[in-house]
Image: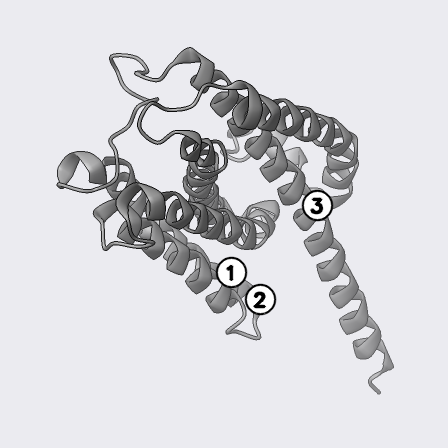
Amino acid sequence: MASPNPSGGFWHRLANPARFQRLSAWLMPWLVLITLGCFGAGLYYGLYASPIDYQQKDTVRIMYVHVPAAWLAMMSYSTLAISGFVALVWRHPLADVAGAATAPIGAVFTFLALFTGAIWGQPTWGTWWVWDARLTSVLILFFMFLGYIAIRNAFDDQARAGRAASLLAIVGVVILPIIKFSVDWWNTLHQPASVSKLSGSSMDPAMLRPLLIMAVAYMALFGVLLLLRMRLELTRRRVEALQMARAGAATP
């Protein structure tokens, strides 16, 4: 009787690039539709139909862009760390591709969270930036993404670069609980969690609904970008492999 393969089943079958390309080609149009539909509904309800905040007035509407970006920044890094772990432990070929594809997307989401947070902070706190625990930890997260990208481009050996970058991603996962609980552990200007609380959300449902719709839109967009970048990365690696094979065949 064959021993069970930890990376077997569905994920093992996806190790075949051609099978992954077919599945992603089928999935992408649906994700695009979800992205467009949720962005349209979320932006309409968030920017026009939702009530204003009694203190922040219309400035609170930045929340519908800023908060999902911050969530997706953390989700992207979680994906990066999981991909790195799977690539190191089970040598799953698509895990390394997923990591290489995720890092730039996560960096963009993190930058968007920092940028929109600065725009929101200026009228709320009277300054664009403070060395607040939440802001500083998210800035570190942004540098973690950039460090991952830099390591992947620092080696000529693609396999070696992938292993080094995966180790960084796994070690750096410690930043996620720091970001999550920074507002509880330290006295910060950043407001505490108002959605993901054990006692339930303290947010008005008229504000919570468009926020969750925008979160779905961001997640669907992440899926579209991830699949697109993975497909491009697989194509690039295949072209490089063919070029190396031809160069080797041409060598006397």
Q: Secondary structure at mark 3?
A: helix
Q: Secondary structure at mark 1?
A: helix
Of 126 and 20, the residue lying toward us: 126
Residue drawn at x 42%, y 64% is: 147
> Which class describes the residues within 10 Å of circle 3: few (<14), some (14-19), or many (20+)?
some
Relative image position of residue 92 (x, y in whole percent): 56, 45
Q: What residue does disc 1 label? A: 162
Q: What residue does disc 3 label? A: 228
Q: Secondary structure at mark 2?
A: helix
Q: Amino acid at mark 1?
A: Gly
Residue drawn at x 50%, y 36% is: 65
Residue drawn at x 24%, y 31% is: 192
Asked if the residue at tag 3 contacts the one at tag 2, i.e. Cβ–Cβ closer than 8 Å, the answer is: no
Comes first in the chain, label 1 or label 3: 1
Which scheme is used to colour this image of the protein?
one colour
Asked which quadrant contains residue 57, the reply is: top left
Q: What residue does disc 2 label? A: 158
Compared across the picture, whether 84 is left or right of 11 comes to left
Q: Amino acid at mark 2?
A: Gln
